[in-house]
Image (cartoon, rainbow, N blue to C red):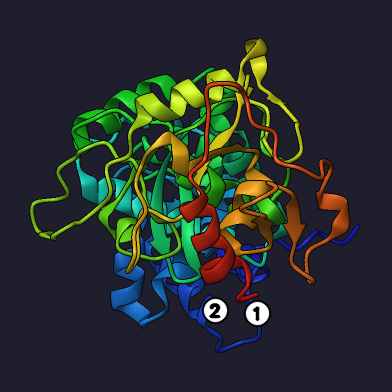
Amino acid sequence: MAMQARMTPAAIIGNSGKQPGSEIEKINAVIIKAGKAGCTAAEVVEACGANEGLIRSHFNTLHSKGLLVKLNRGRYAVAKSATNGDDFNAPEVGEYDANTQLVERWEQVEANIRTLEAARRSEAAQLREEYGALITKGRHFIAYQSESGVAFAPSKFIGYIDNDIATHRNLRSNGRNGRETSKALKRILGGAPEADESAEKAYLNFCGTLGTPDEHARKYWITDKVIQTSAVHELNLPDWTPPPEITSTITRKIRDTATTKRLKSLYDYKCMVCGIRLGLSGGKGYAECGHIRPIGGPQPGPDEPENILVLCPNHHVMLDAGLLGIDPGTLKIRLAPRAEPADLIQTRLRLCKGHTLRREHLEYHQQEIFNRQ
């Protein structure tokens, strides 16, 4: 009987690479050379000059396949399962993975965000699928500015030091959840996350290609990198102190949350355009308050009930984009030519007793926003 050839760690891990001489091949060579001591993404960058995002994505992929073991301080080593009997003295999968600790510094949070971004752009379908599940099932998020726009990092992932997809899967199976991570992030950011309509709207848009978000209330920490982008605007933000090495000047509109809460309650969280009430768990309703005349921009409107509509997320977006207009005299609802007629249910804006709108704000929206579409 012929003996079965044994595969070395280099051969097994090498099977996950691309063509010889590629960046993946170079990364694999560094991992193998590091042996049981392991290596970090930064050490691989220094050794072969590969892209850090690609390195983190590759670490994620090999770890999820059981070919790498995560040590401490972001180090990865070839797992015993990858040696196939080769005398490599490698650790077992899971030997170190349970030792994950909570983050203590902003730099540790940033490292986890880079790992998330690597998973988001990974060629491995399983990693992208698990990334999508993390985003759509989360409750507390840090919003940050990525290369492709505003993105969201769930506290239950970024709250553990040097986390990755495979390690997080093990943590989840051991009953760990986001409560302890939110407390750790609160200490770092100097405040608790808060519900925010603009951030929620950006989050729902972000989830468009990832799947349907779970039906529960979400809260956000907003970083200075998001505040300074036009993708999310007029945010009602918690105050927090950015990392010591970052200084920035931030100007933002402070919204009257008491007024918006009162209006939502008056309309029982039903959209004034379509009449739909979005229900959350526990019988709670969800609606957003949109300004007819934006409170930001060159001719800002006031943050007062006469300039506010209670809307569902879809019609809030349409109002801001000028796809939906309201006749100042009759309150009839109008749609821009490129809007879908199916989006409209009522023909006239529904006003509750005790809530009036100022004609000048409706005229401004019609002339400066709706008529320009």
Q: CA distance from mark 2 to mark 1?
A: 7 Å
Q: Residue at x 54, y 60 (%)?
A: 363
Give SS at disc 1: loop
Q: Amino acid at mark 2?
A: Glu
Give the farthest residue toward the right: 1
Tell me which corner region of the image, top left, top right, bottom left or bottom right, holds residue 304: top left
Bin the neighbour count of mark 2 within 10 Å (Cα to Cα): few under 14, some 14-19, many 20 and up: some
Q: Position of residue 80 (x, y in %)?
A: 55, 46
Most foreground residue, 257 or 299: 299
Total marks in image: 2
Q: Residue at x 32, y 42 (%)?
A: 72
Tell me which corner region of the image, top left, top right, bottom left or bottom right, holds residue 169: top right
Left or right, residue 213 beside residue 53: right
Q: Position of residue 347 (x, y in %)?
A: 81, 45
Q: Is residue 271 above or below residue 110?
A: above
Most foreground residue, 186 or 80: 186
Residue 6 in view:
yes
User: Mark 1 sits on what residue?
Assistant: 18
Left or right, residue 3 beside residue 267: right
Bin the neighbour count of mark 1 within 10 Å (Cα to Cα): few under 14, some 14-19, many 20 and up: few
Give the farthest residue toward the top: 282
Give SS at disc 2: helix
Most foreground residue, 288 or 129: 288
Residue 37 in view:
no
Q: Residue at x 66, y 57 (%)?
A: 325
Tell me which corner region of the image, top left, top right, bottom left or bottom right, holds residue 312: top right
Q: Quadrant of the N terminus?
A: bottom right
Q: Position of residue 174 (x, y in %)?
A: 54, 20
User: Mark 2 sits on what residue?
Assistant: 25
Q: Earlier in the sequence, mark 2 or mark 1?
A: 1
Q: Are marks 2 and 1 in contact (CB under 8 Å)?
A: yes
Q: Position of residue 84 (x, y in %)?
A: 65, 51
